[in-house]
Every structure is written in structure tokens, then in C-alpha cells.
Amino acid sequence: MTRLLEARGLEAAYYTPDGSRVVAVDDVSLEINDGEVLGIAGESGCGKSTLGAILSLTARDPLRVEQGTLIVDGQQQVLGPRSRVPRTWRGSVVSLLPQGAMNSISPTMRVRDLVFDVMRAHDRGVKRSDALDRARDRFAELDLPVRALDAYPHQLSGGMKQRVVTVVSTLLNPRLLIADEPTSALDVSSQKALIDMLLQMLENKIMSGVVFITHDLPVLRTVSDRIAVMYAGKIAEIGDAEEIATAPRHPYSAALLNSVLVPEPSFRRKRVKGIPGSPPNLLHPPDGCRFHPRCGLATDACRTKQPPQVGDELRFSACFWSAEHPGETVPTDRVIPIEEPTMISPQHAAGQEPDDHDRLLGTESLSTDSGVAR
Ligand SMILES: Nc1ncnc2c1ncn2[C@@H]1O[C@H](COP(=O)(O)OP(=O)(O)OP(=O)(O)O)[C@@H](O)[C@H]1O
């Protein structure tokens, strides 16, 4: 299998106005094979978006990438305070679909203007007509209505807007697309349409790999070949999506899976096992394994020493328990020390506030079939 990405020793920190240094991604290494979707999972604040910014070379103040190496499709980029990223990398080697991208298009800009801007950012001399031709071909290839190019953002449904922005951000055929929470604001049918389109783009070799960032584990299981579970700036576990979802080897992955809310007929009475406590403040992360204060399997070693990485680059768990039980699945009934049963409402089970839920349904029910208002 060909390696598309090798990322080694990535480290990035936020510098706050009071001079503090918050290390949000700490010594992260990972690999992606050609044609793969790598999902990045983890609770809010664990460093997913920061990792996305490093991989897409889009880190900006107050975030500084302090060290690491990226090798994409055989091309190497050393990262650090003094490294200069060639302009040709952004958009064509790596491209970011940022969180909330679909809502950040200027309301006075037609999609075709956005297309021209994106193409011109890479090639100052590109002609408007050539940029548009390329977009037209791409829209047709992916069964998107070509007339969406003439639309203003407000004329597109949420789902169509997100698909359009995704296509525009990959017009330069990046080898790797980093999609940060691309489905989070979408209803389920728009989520499916976007995921189908991303998979089609991979099949058509528009890009060779995708990093898909979301806290939504069921979505991640559907779309990913492998999943990396992040905790407090580090990768706790990485492996095949199915294995992570059904046979986790790291107590944090198991706890995260236990806390997924699955809507089912009896869910009003369902007791959900949340993860007790909260993720650490990254200004002062705990010694040893960063998950140890919340882990039911923690031993003295976990409290004082860095956990070993058990496995290889493609499938590992950074955990003392895993080292003692190689290849074993974490006993999920033992990972959560203090059980805090929570009664949940239907809206919370779907991961939405009641108002958001209604708004989403309302918005989408106004959309036309093609997603473009006439
Ligand atoms: N501007 C900032 N200044 C200081 N610290 C920051 C800043 N932005 C993020 N952080 C810290 O960096 C850590 C990682 O943030 P990041 O946004 O990468 O997490 P995330 O997993 O993507 O979260 P979410 O799912 O909520 O988007 C967090 O703990 C956060 O407190």
C-alpha cells in the first residue's frame, strides 16, 4: 500500500496575550495510505482543529507550529518557527475545508466569483473563463447542478452550500483534503450526500486522501477507513475504524464509545454513561498518561510515566494497560470509575438543542431537490 502522508513529531502551541504557552498538539505522528479516509475523533478541545491546521499548513497567530515534518506524496516539508511553506503547497498538495466554511462565503459573492478567487490565489495569471470551465467540468463530474455556479450563498440549501464549498476547495486537486467538522451543521440526508460525494472524489482521484475531523463517532465510523482518537493534544489510539468502534484497546476510546447517544425506542429511559470529570487544561496537563485522572484502569505507572505506544504506526494504543494486555479489547464495564447515569431527552440524544433541531428541519424542508433555490 502506498503511503500518502507521513507526519512526524508534530507540535503546535497557542501563545496567549498573558504570555502563556498552550501546547494543543504534542508530539503527534501519523500516517495515511493512498485512497484512505482517516477520521479524527475526540472531545471538544482535544486538539482536532489544531492538528487540522498543522496538516493543512494554515496555522496562524496565536497558533505557532513549533516542530514536525510532513511528507505528502513524497514531498517533504519541515515545520518550525523558521520554516517557509511554499505557496504551491496550499490548495494543491494539502487543502483545508475549515469548520463553518459554508457560512463564511461573502453573501454578495456568487459561487463563480469564489471559484475565480480560489484559482487565482494559486495562479495569479489564471483566466476567469478557464477557472469557470474547470469548475463547470468538476460540478458535472460530481453531479452537482452547474447553475449553482451563478447562485449567491443564500440561494443554496445548507447541504448544497457545503458540497459546493467542498468542491471549490478541491479544484486544484490537492493530494490531501482536511475536512474539519464538514457534516456537523447538516441534517442526516445532507450528511450522507456530502459523505457520498467525498468518497466519489476519492474514487475519481480528485484527491488521494481525506482527514475527516468530527466529534460525531457514528459519522466517523461510516466514512473512515481508520480512526485516530485524540485526547489532550495526543493520539490515544489509532486503528481500523471498525476495530476502534467495536474493539477499542485504549480506555479513553472505550469511554468515548460508551458515551455515544444512540436514539432508540427506549432511549427516554436509557442510562447514558458519560465520561466522568473533564479533559485537562492544556496549560497544565497531568503528569504521566493525560487520561489517568479519568481512567478506571489507571495504575501508579500511569500517574507518573509517559504511556508506551503499543503497536505500529497504523494501529497503536498509547497505554500501559494495552502493553500488559497486547491485542486485547478494553473491558468497557471497567473503564469508567464513577458511574454518573444521565437521563436524556430526544433532542439531546440526537446531539442537538431543541431549537437547532427544529431550525435544521425547517431549513432543509424549504430546499428544493437539487438544493438550489429557483
Ligand atoms: N486562541 C487560543 N488561545 C489559547 N488556547 C487555545 C486557542 N484556541 C484553542 N486553544 C486551546 O487549544 C486546545 C485545542 O483546541 P482545538 O480547537 O484544536 O480543539 P478541538 O478538538 O478542535 O475542539 P472543538 O471540537 O471544540 O473544535 C483547546 O484546549 C483550547 O483550549
Image (cartoon, rainbow, N blue to C red):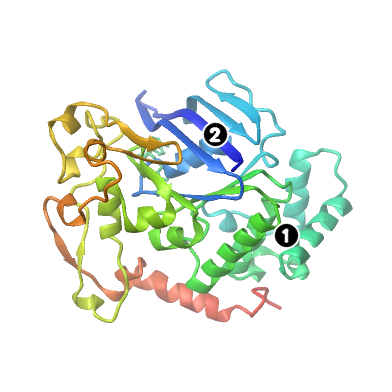
The residue lying at 34 percent from left, 25 percent from top is: 20
Q: Which residue is mark 1?
A: 111
Whether label 1 touches label 2, CB < 8 Å: no
Residue 6 is marked as 2
Question: Residue 76 lies in what quarter of the image?
Answer: top right
Question: How many C-alpha atoms fall within 10 Å of the one at disc 2: few (<14), some, or many (≥20)?
Answer: some
Disc 2 C-beta below 8 A from ligand 1: no
Disc 1 residue type (three-letter) = Val
Q: Nearer the viewer, residue 181 or 236?
A: 236
Residue 126 versus residue 143 in the image, above or below: above
Q: Amino acid at mark 2?
A: Glu
Among numbered discs 1 and 2, the one appearing first in the sequence: 2
For the residues labelled 1 and 2, the Cα–Cα distance comes to 34 Å
**x and y percentages locating residue 182 in the rendered image:** 52, 57
Quadrant including the N terminus: top right
On the question of residue 132 being in view, the answer is yes
Badge 1: few (under 14), some or many (20 or more) residues near its Cα, within 10 Å? many
Which residue lies at the image location 61% right of the left edge and 26% below the top edge? 77
Q: Nearer the viewer, mark 1 or mark 2?
A: 2
- Find ligand 1 in the image and state its quadrant: top left
Question: Total number of numbered labels?
Answer: 2
Image position of 143 with respect to 137: above or below? below
Residue 133 located left or right of residue 118: right
The residue at label 1 has a CB less than 8 Å from ligand 1? no
Residue 324, image quadrant: top left
Label 1 residue SS: helix
**Residue at 22 percent of width and 53 percent of height:** 275
**Residue sitting nearer the eye, 12 or 298:** 298
Kindly state the secondary structure of the residue where label 2 is placed: strand
